[in-house]
Image (cartoon, rainbow, N blue to C red):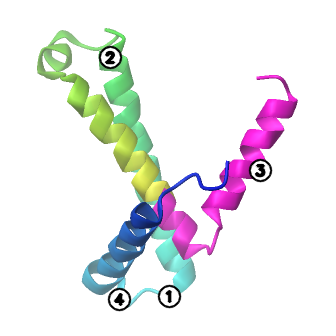
Amino acid sequence: MKNAFTPEFLEWINDVDQRLVEKHEGDMYDDKRILSRTVKLSEEVGELSEAILSYVNNQRAEKLEKFNKSDLDAEIADVIITAMVIARATKTDVNAAIIAKLKKIEKRGI
């Protein structure tokens, strides 16, 4: 595998990052920006967890009535996008990191 993500997706993540800085984070220093985005990732993982509970029918009745599979899809996307924005802020080469991790998993026979 050469690329885990398309150049278009990575460019879109760059654009999202720039918009976040311009709209909400202009006065933040880099460490504070990274911490803020990490807190946001925790929030998104919590929302994904709620969607998973609904998906497996392990949620209160009123939440199950409102649940739609597209909610789960959207929460997974939110987690991925937020993680990618953090990766950009920390100058992480996500493509290289994912390929290295996949090779490590493959060596374990998973």
Q: Is residue 44 left or right of residue 32?
A: left
Q: CA distance from mark 2 to mark 3?
A: 31 Å
| Within-10-Å neighbours for mark 3: few <14, some 14–19, many 20+ | few
Residue placed most toward the observer, 9 or 43: 9
Q: Could you tell which of marks 4 and 2 lies nearer the N-terminus?
A: 4
Q: Are marks 1 and 2 in contact (CB under 8 Å)?
A: no
Identify the mark at residue 55; answer none if there is no mark: 2
Q: Are marks 4 and 3 in contact (CB under 8 Å)?
A: no
Q: Which residue is mark 4?
A: 26
Looking at the rendered structure, the kind of residue marked 2 is Tyr
Q: From the top left corner, tell me how far across and down residue 109 is, in percent.
A: 83, 23
Magenta includes 45? Answer: no
Q: From the top left corner, tell me how far across and down residue 8 is, in percent.
A: 40, 65
Q: Could you tell which of marks 4 and 3 lies nearer the N-terminus?
A: 4
The correct choice, above or below, for 104 with respect to 12 in the image is: above
| Within-10-Å neighbours for mark 1: few <14, some 14–19, many 20+ | few
Q: From the top left corner, tell me how far across and down residue 98 is, in percent.
A: 67, 50
Instruction: Tell me which corner region of the image, top left, top right, bottom left or bottom right, holds residue 108.
Output: top right
Q: Which residue is mark 1?
A: 29
Looking at the rendered structure, the kind of residue marked 1 is Tyr
| Nearer mark to the viewer, of 4 and 2 | 2
| Magenta residues, dominant SS class | helix
Q: CA distance from mark 4 to mark 2?
A: 38 Å
